[in-house]
């Protein structure tokens, strides 16, 4: 009996372990978990997913679509739909005009990447049809169908279509050749360069699946602070191996090119873009790359910024440099993405002015296969920035949005900050460059110019950690970016709901509270880091934590004091006509509105104005009291996020709940640090007493100044 009892106890332990193992998740599957649906949902769905029908020999891309549907429905239904070539009742049919013209009609407006999903009846058979003009469209449609089911949609009344509003939807990896990642907070680079090209990690395929599920169709493999070696034969072979894995998923490979590569490799005597030997070198290099990667997308270039070489070293313009490269890749339909993130210490003007000053005069001088890639704001991926004044100001030049997905200035992967809300805020801003309104999203979509290049780039937050992004909630920023690159006018809240339903559960007891947390989170970070238009107060170099006191770095615009300009009289950067006049770079209606602090949106107040500490805010508080109220509100919101997450504990698997809870604990602590350090510093500068009832900082200003982080992550 004792032996039987021990055996029974062991069985109980095994069953318990199995159950725990079944519910514990590490985040690797992202939003593509495909967990079993409840019995009612399975009963409703099963008759609509009896088989997968594709007529003809499947291309690698079509096979990827079929495999994903089998994986997805197999997981959600517990039974993999059989592959078939004949229509049967309840089948999911993948149709193109070439394979099944009778089911793929009226698709002209969808282009080469769009898709149509619909429920229909053919010859008495109930079918779910994914129709597209190409196999790539079928792949996107397959993911859209799985997304619909995963978020609770019913297949018996399906009738929708979608096509991307932007042609180029790219990730920019700031990954170095030694596997460090500049501004990366999720482990080493996903690209194991040392083992490539011979060993191709299966993670590359899962990366491709995740991007294809969002409609991302390109990836720049290496850091914009590039090394010349990336364009040598061994590294081209490595890039070609990655391209082979990504290609079936509709993803092209691009490379960041260092401007002075031919000179540094000692293959030319100059890097002057107008020197024939330089142009010939790049033409030969393009030929070499396209032999290895026939669908190579092109080059991304950071030039004459932060010490990087560029055409201005030879008294040439950005257009001279970009056009020379564009000619080299043009025969292969390649493109050049030329970053507008330029600033130089030898130009003692407001850093916010420099990109506009350099690029606006070049409007109309770039070749058609050049895109000017512009950051969302004029400084540098701050928690909040006004939209970049170049949007809407270069009508003759295709502009590409550059968002940052990795949170260099928003708490790394430690702090919860849903960036979908930030992206949406920028995209919906009205540039007022046209009567009736002209949003940033409309600038990017560029409908006035037909087939001219359009695009969006996101600086990736992807690394070698099992959860890909360093935290579970940071996956949502990758997700939201990809979906907004497909449709820049999509709703950030709806995208948060999609992500939450697929990542955790479609149960509204979870999705509702999780979405509310996400929509609160970014504003919380703004409040405890950079309220009322303050910016760039972070620790220098690593950008971790508050350091508004730093004033000792070699160039003015690397010092936080350059941006807040706090003194005894007041605080803020005057960008009106009495200051740097950067405001004049915006359309006249915006410039007029923002010239007066009383009509400037409060969220941008100290971005555009230097105001007295006693300036009367709309709330009735002084500016000093309002700033402190925002810091306190941010800390309170961080605590609120932690409390809300604790209430979800019964509904979230133990591992992911604990992982997130631990990070939220850190966020609360660091929000308090931000609040206390900034109040201590600004009080020391202003000489103002704390408002009545406000709690003093926990430590002295000297203590906060003494903190150093020489090994903070992300420095690359």
Image: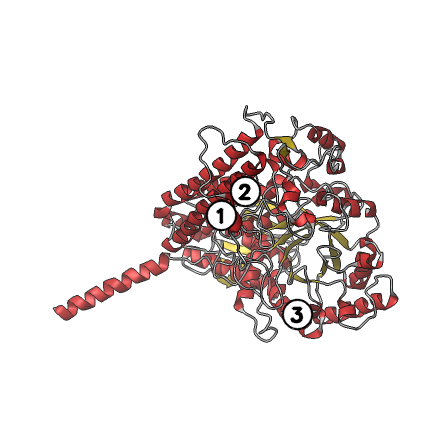
- What is the secondary structure assignment of the residue under circle 2? helix
Q: Alpha-carbon distance for marks 3 and 2?
A: 42 Å
Q: Identify the residue under disc 3.
A: 240
Q: Alpha-carbon distance for marks 3 and 1?
A: 51 Å
- What is the secondary structure assignment of the residue under circle 3? helix
Q: Nearer the viewer, mark 3 or mark 1?
A: 1
- What is the secondary structure assignment of the residue under circle 1? helix
Q: Residues within 10 Å of mark 1 (few under 14, many from 20)?
A: few
Residue 529 numbered mark, or none = 2
Instruction: For the N terminus, give its image quadrant.
Output: bottom left
Residue 466 numbered mark, or none = none
Instruction: For the C terminus, give its image quadrant.
Output: bottom right
Placement of 364 over or under 223, stated as above or below = above
Give the number of marks.
3
Q: Identify the residue under disc 1.
A: 703
Q: Position of residue 615 (x, y in %)?
A: 61, 27
Which of 698/366 is in front? 698
């Amino acid at each position: 009996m004792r032996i039987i009892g021990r055996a029974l106890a062991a069985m109980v332990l095994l069953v318990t372990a199995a159950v725990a193992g079944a519910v514990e998740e590490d985040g690797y599957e992202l939003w593509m978990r495909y967990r079993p649906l409840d019995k009612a949902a399975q009963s409703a769905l099963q008759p609509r997913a009896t088989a997968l029908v594709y007529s003809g020999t499947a291309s690698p891309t079509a096979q990827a679509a079929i495999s994903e549907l089998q994986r997805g429905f197999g997981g959600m239904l517990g039974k993999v739909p059989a592959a078939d070539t004949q229509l049967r009742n309840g089948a999911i049919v993948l149709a193109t005009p070439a394979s099944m013209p009778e089911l793929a009609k009226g698709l002209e407006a969808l282009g080469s990447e769009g898709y149509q999903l619909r429920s229909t009846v053919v010859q008495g058979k109930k079918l779910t049809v994914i129709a597209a003009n190409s196999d790539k469209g079928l792949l996107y449609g397959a993911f859209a169908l799985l997304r619909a089911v995963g978020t609770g949609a019913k297949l018996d009344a399906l009738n929708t279509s979608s096509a991307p509003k932007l042609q180029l939807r790219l990730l920019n990896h700031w990954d170095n050749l030694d596997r460090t990642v500049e501004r990366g907070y999720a482990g080493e680079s996903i690209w194991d360069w040392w083992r490539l090209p011979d060993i191709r990690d299966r993670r590359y395929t899962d990366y491709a699946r995740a991007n294809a599920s969002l409609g991302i169709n390109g990836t720049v493999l290496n850091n914009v602070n590039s090394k010349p070696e990336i364009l040598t034969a061994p590294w081209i072979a490595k890039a070609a191996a990655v391209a082979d894995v990504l290609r079936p998923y509709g993803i092209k490979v691009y490379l960041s090119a260092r401007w002075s590569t031919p000179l540094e490799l000692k293959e030319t005597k100059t890097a002057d873009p107008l020197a024939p030997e330089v142009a010939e070198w790049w033409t030969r290099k393009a030929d070499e790359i396209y032999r290895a990667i026939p669908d190579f997308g092109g080059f991304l270039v950071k030039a004459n910024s932060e010490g990087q070489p560029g055409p201005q070293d030879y008294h040439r313009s950005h257009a001279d440099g970009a056009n020379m490269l564009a000619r080299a890749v043009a025969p292969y339909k390649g493109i050049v993405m030329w970053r507008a993130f330029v600033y130089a210490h030898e130009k003692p003007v407001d850093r916010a002015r420099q990109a506009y000053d350099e690029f606006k005069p070049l409007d109309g001088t770039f070749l058609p296969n050049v895109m000017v890639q512009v950051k969302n704001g004029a400084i540098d991926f701050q928690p909040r920035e006004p939209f970049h004044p170049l949007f809407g100001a270069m009508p003759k030049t295709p502009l590409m949005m550059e968002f940052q997905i990795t949170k260099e200035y928003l708490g790394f992967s430690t702090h919860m900050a849903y960036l979908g809300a930030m992206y949406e805020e920028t995209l919906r801003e009205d540039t007022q460059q046209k009567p009736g309104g002209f949003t940033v999203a409309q600038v990017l979509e560029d409908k006035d110019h037909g087939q001219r290049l359009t695009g969006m780039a996101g600086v990736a937050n992807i690394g070698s950690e099992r959860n890909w992004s360093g935290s579970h909630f940071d996956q949502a920023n990758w997700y939201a970016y990809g979906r907004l690159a497909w449709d820049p006018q999509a709703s950030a809240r709806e995208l948060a709901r999609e992500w939450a339903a697929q990542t955790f559960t479609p149960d509204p007891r979870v999705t509702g509270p999780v979405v509310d947390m996400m929509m609160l989170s970014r504003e919380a970070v703004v409040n405890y880091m950079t309220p009322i238009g303050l910016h760039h107060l972070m620790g220098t170099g690593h950008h971790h934590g508050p350091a508004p006191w730093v004033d000792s770095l070699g160039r003015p615009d690397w010092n936080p004091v350059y941006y807040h300009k706090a003194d005894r009289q007041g605080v803020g950067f005057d960008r009106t006509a009495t200051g740097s006049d950067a405001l004049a770079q915006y359309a006249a209606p915006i410039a007029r509105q923002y010239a007066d602090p009383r009509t400037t949106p409060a969220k941008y107040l100290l971005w555009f104005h230097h105001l007295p500490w006693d300036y009367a805010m709309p709330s009735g508080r002084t500016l000093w009291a309002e700033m402190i109220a925002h810091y306190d509100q941010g800390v309170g919101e961080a605590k609120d996020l932690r409390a809300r997450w604790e209430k979800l504990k019964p509904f979230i698997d133990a591992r992911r709940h604990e992982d997130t809870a631990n990070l939220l604990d850190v966020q609360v602590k660091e929000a308090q640090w931000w609040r206390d350090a900034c109040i201590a510093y600004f009080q020391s500068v202003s000489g103002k007493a704390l408002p009545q009832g406000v709690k003093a900082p926990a430590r002295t200003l000297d203590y906060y100044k003494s903190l150093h982080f020489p090994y903070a992550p992300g420095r690359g």
